[in-house]
Amino acid sequence: MTFSLLGRCARTGQFGAIVTTSSIGVGARCAFARAGVGAALTQHRTDPRLGPVMLDLMASGLTGPEALAGTVAATPHRDWRQLAIIDAAGRTAAFTGAHVRPAHGEAHGTDCVAIGNIIRDGAMPAVMVRAFEADPALPLAARLVAAIQAGEAAGGEIASVASAALLVVDRERFPYVDLRVDEHARPLDELARLWSAYAPQADDYVRRAVDPDGAALYVAPPAKE
């Protein structure tokens, strides 16, 4: 009961993932990304150990498809897993095990891959890919949000979604964006709102870490009455 998309920005070199599901805490379990390396997804009877494994294999020199194939081959319970990967060159791969419940699907596009399980329509990931590809000039995070919203509009999953997460990495070892929504009636709308609020501050949060002398002075928002 999860649908998601991995994306790469050819202009900035950023990687990102966006994911939503009907259970709590999807951001803690499913999406993984590493600057300069790529991004990975693990879902359906989720094994969070597989995300770092795929990233480590790419960091060792394997392509995304090679890293996914190696992970699948070494995973004892592979039939329960649904995985996706994107590498530094934008190459993508996905895997859906034999026990993954329908409807499920995957779709690949320019610098992106979308997957879903227990969704209303197996063709829905292709809708997400088209939304992601629509405007490459937008920030990667904005394209990811547009993709997940398009997936929900195209039918989403069988149950109502309750959690969502947006993860983007840039040049540093820490995430450029890491936003999560849990147990919310409209988590995708809330995630989009959080991104809109975070976007103007994202670069300065990085600057505070790497160049604190040049960072903007923090001004606390006015207290609510």
Image (cartoon, helix red, strand yellow):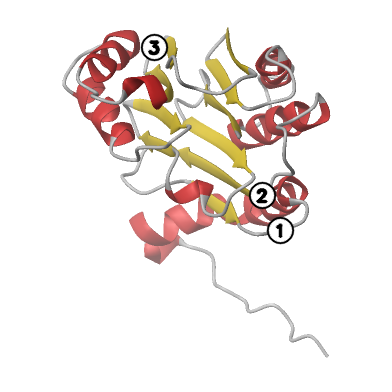
Label 1 neighbourhood size at 10 Å, few (<14), some (14-19), many (20+)?
Answer: some
Q: Secondary structure at mark 2?
A: helix
From this viewpoint, is residue 90 visible?
no
Of residues 64 and 34, the one nearer the viewer is 64
The span from disc 1 to disc 2 (Cα, nearest Å) is: 16 Å
In front: label 3 or label 1? 1
**Does any portion of residue 182 appear in the rendered image?**
yes
Q: Residue at x 47, y 30 (%)?
A: 14
Sequence order check, earlier mark of 3 and 1? 3
Q: Amino acid at mark 2?
A: Trp
Residue sitting at the far bottom: 225
Q: Earlier in the sequence, mark 3 or mark 2?
A: 3
Query: How far across and down, in percent of the image, does residue 54 sit?
Result: 28, 26
What is the CA distance from the residue labelled 3 to the residue labelled 2? 26 Å
Percent position (x, y) of residue 41? 44, 30
Evaluate if marks 3 and 1 touch, with contact meaning CB atoms under 8 Å apart: no
The disc at residue 195 is 2
Q: x and y percent of residue 149 in the render?
A: 75, 34
Say which of 124 and 117 sits in front.
117
Judge from the rendering whether residue 70 lies leftward or rightward of residue 94; answer left or right: left
Q: Secondary structure under badge 1?
A: loop
Q: Is residue 172 above or below residue 14?
A: below
Q: Residue 184: which numbered mark, if any? A: 1
Q: Is residue 221 above or below residue 98?
A: below
Question: Relative to the observer, which residue lies in front, 212 or 11?
Answer: 11
193 vs 39: above or below: below
Q: Residue at x 62, y 76 (%)?
A: 219
Vertical placement of residue 181 versus 91, above or below: below
Tags 1 and 2 in contact by the CB under 8 Å rule?
no
| The N terminus, quarter of image | top right
Label for residue 48? none
Task: Give the label on residue 89, or none.
Answer: 3
